Amino acid sequence: MKTSNLSKSYGDIFAIRDVSIEINQGEIFGLMGPNGAGKSTLIRILSTLTKSSSGEASIFGYNLRKDQRQVKKLIGIVLHHNLLYDELTAKENLSYYLRLYGFRNKETIEKIIFEKTSQFNIVDRVEDQIGTLSSGQRKRFDIIRATIHNPKLLLLDEPFSGLDRQGIAQLKDFFNSTKKNSTILFSTHNQQIGEEVSDRIATLEKGRIIETKTSGD
């Protein structure tokens, strides 16, 4: 994944400005910075949800502007608000998304749901309505929803927010196991978590990248 001088402005105000990063396949890349630094805007642009004002971006060789259909097949997205239906059970939500990605066999769908929910130790909550779950449980199911089709690029905006200590540990383990098949880009304002989880970190301030470093440096 690569961006070159990527910018997004609203009139004279820049949300991000001249952002250039290159993320290697299988890498866990963290975006750090305070609220308003531009982290969410960058992730929304890469998720095809927001159009950039200028600059270029490519995901596994596909141009973000010209090849959106192909890009959407390759990515999984976790935003601040979850993309689950409150009135449906967790299992119904995950089954729905699996069918969107072309899965039809009932046994295969149930197997995938069991394997994914086992990673987060929430198998016993799959029959519960999403609207009845805690924020941390909803976050876990939303992360599962985003990765249910094994995307090549996983984009997560503040995924550790709202998780308890156990949930944070599970997500860290999940990242490490997922990076074998997926590239991960996530944002966080928590420096400790960013350094513990990432292979590399870019720090944003007022829409610009002010530093990129290997985690632990």
Image (cartoon, rainbow, N blue to C red):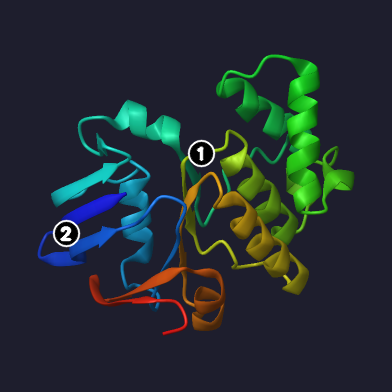
Residue 7's place in the image compared with 147, above or below, is: below
Mark nearest the camera among 1 and 2 is 1
Residue toward you, 148 or 36: 148
- Report the quarter where the C terminus lies: bottom left
Please state which amino acid type lies under the numbered disc 1.
Pro
What's the residue at 79%, 30% (across, down)? 111
Dot 2, crowdedness within 10 Å: few (<14), some or many (≥20)? some
Residue 123's place in the image compared with 199, above or below, is: above
Residue 192's place in the image compared with 100, above or below, is: below
What's the residue at 54%, 82% (across, down)? 192
Query: What's the CA distance linking mark 1 and mark 2?
Result: 29 Å
What's the residue at 30%, 49% (across, down)? 45
Q: Quadrant of residue 123?
A: top right
Residue 159's place in the image compared with 49, above or below, is: below
Residue 90 percent location from the top left of the image: 75, 39
Residue 4 percent location from the top left of the image: 17, 55
Residue behind mark 2: 9
Dot 1, crowdedness within 10 Å: few (<14), some or many (≥20)? many
Residue behind mark 1: 151
> Disc 2 on helix, strand or loop?
strand
10 relative position to 32: left or right = left
146 relative position to 206: left or right = right
